[in-house]
Image: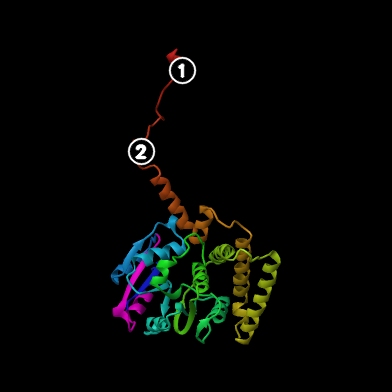
């Protein structure tokens, strides 16, 4: 038995080291290989990963999708099990990998996903989302296809039969789980394999995250709709719910502005995704995946690359040419 941990990364120097230290401390570390799929980091992410002996695989930023990055990592993996972890997560316990793999004793289990919790940097509303979707009780025969590839593991043999969709702008995990569950396989939730998921998103990144997920959801489940009334209703109901929890926790005045911001952008992004293009163009895709400063650098690089392969440019600035002289 060997487990390949596949990490997708982009400019994660602040967090990648903590994840890799957590992996080194695993009880099954000798049976683990670590693969980093990096999509154009300009910081020390790759340098740090190399210090841990991680196998590095690179993809160009303009070719990135979540599904493609995972597929590239899976192709490079040699393990029987493929464990996916975001570069900005870290395990809480040394038996994380062991607990994630244990449910595969049941041959019908195709996918196991683990619990996620936040930390002091996590926005209040996202703490509520973690509590809702990642409860404290395990479920080894889950009826719905929900899962999350920030902390999930699958059988490699099943990935070889069913790779991840490279066209989706997100929710490639939900899409894969839906397809594999339809073939009669089971999805298991392991509450005793928690990771801390660190999200330090700007407001625009929050909106873009939910926008790209809504675009993906519209492609996975074309019958689903999300109207402007849905935006109004869900924004208000979730602000109210979070506010009630904050009052009970004596955090209302500290967190209320954050609650309004997060929930409004969450559902506004969802509305934009559902009611925009089903297949976004490259400009929109880049906007959803990468911050503004990186997009500018990328387009400058591509502009420079587009001129490679030509001869020396002709300089017309000093040319003195008069049509009258040629008559």
**Residue 146, x across and y down, in percent:** 53, 75
Which residue has dot 2 on it?
310
Query: Where does the N terminus fall, quadrant-wise?
Result: bottom left
Look at the picture and state if 69 lies above or below 123.
above
**Residue 197, x across and y down, in percent:** 47, 76
Q: CA distance from mark 2 to mark 1?
A: 29 Å
Q: Which residue is at a point 59% across and 56% down the rendered structure image?
A: 277
Of residues 81 and 251, which is closer to you in this image? 81
| Left or right, residue 276 beside residue 172 | right
* Magenta residue check for 32: yes
**Residue 202, x across and y down, in percent:** 53, 66
Of residues 187 and 299, which is closer to you in this image? 187
Magenta span: 18-39
Query: Where does the C terminus fall, quadrant-wise?
Result: top left
Which residue has dot 1 on it?
323
Residue 9 seen in the figure: no
Q: Residue furthest top?
A: 327
């Amino acid at each position: 038995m060997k487990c390949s941990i596949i990490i997708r990364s982009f400019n994660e120097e602040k967090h990648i080291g903590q994840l890799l230290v957590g992996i080194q401390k695993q009880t099954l570390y000798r049976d683990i290989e670590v693969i980093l799929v990096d999509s154009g980091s300009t910081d020390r992410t790759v340098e740090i990963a190399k210090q841990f002996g991680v196998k590095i695989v690179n993809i160009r930023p303009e070719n990135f999708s979540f599904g493609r990055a995972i597929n590239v990592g899976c192709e490079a993996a040699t393990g029987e099990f493929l464990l996916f972890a975001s570069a900005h997560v870290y395990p809480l316990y040394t038996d994380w990998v062991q607990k994630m793999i244990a449910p595969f004793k049941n041959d019908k289990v195709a996918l196991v996903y683990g619990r996620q919790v936040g930390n002091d940097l996590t926005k209040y509303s996202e703490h509520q989302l973690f509590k809702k979707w990642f409860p404290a009780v395990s479920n080894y025969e889950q009826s719905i296809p929900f899962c999350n590839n920030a902390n999930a593991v699958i059988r490699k043999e099943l990935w070889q039969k069913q790779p991840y969709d490279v066209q989706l702008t997100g929710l490639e995990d939900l899409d894969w789980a839906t397809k594999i569950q339809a073939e009669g396989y089971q999805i298991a939730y392991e509450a005793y394999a928690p990771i801390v998921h660190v999200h330090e998103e700007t407001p625009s990144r929050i909106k873009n995250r939910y926008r790209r997920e809504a675009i993906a959801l519209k492609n996975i489940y074309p019958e689903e709709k999300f109207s402007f009334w849905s935006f109004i209703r869900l924004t208000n109901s979730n602000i109210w719910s979070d506010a009630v929890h904050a009052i009970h926790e004596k955090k209302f005045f500290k967190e209320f502005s954050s609650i309004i911001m997060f929930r409004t952008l969450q559902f506004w992004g969802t509305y934009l995704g559902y009611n925009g293009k089903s297949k976004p163009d490259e400009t929109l895709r880049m906007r959803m995946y990468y911050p503004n400063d990186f997009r500018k650098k990328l387009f400058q690089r591509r502009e420079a690359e587009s001129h490679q392969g030509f001869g020396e440019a002709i300089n017309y600035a000093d040319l003195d040419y008069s049509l009258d002289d040629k008559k």
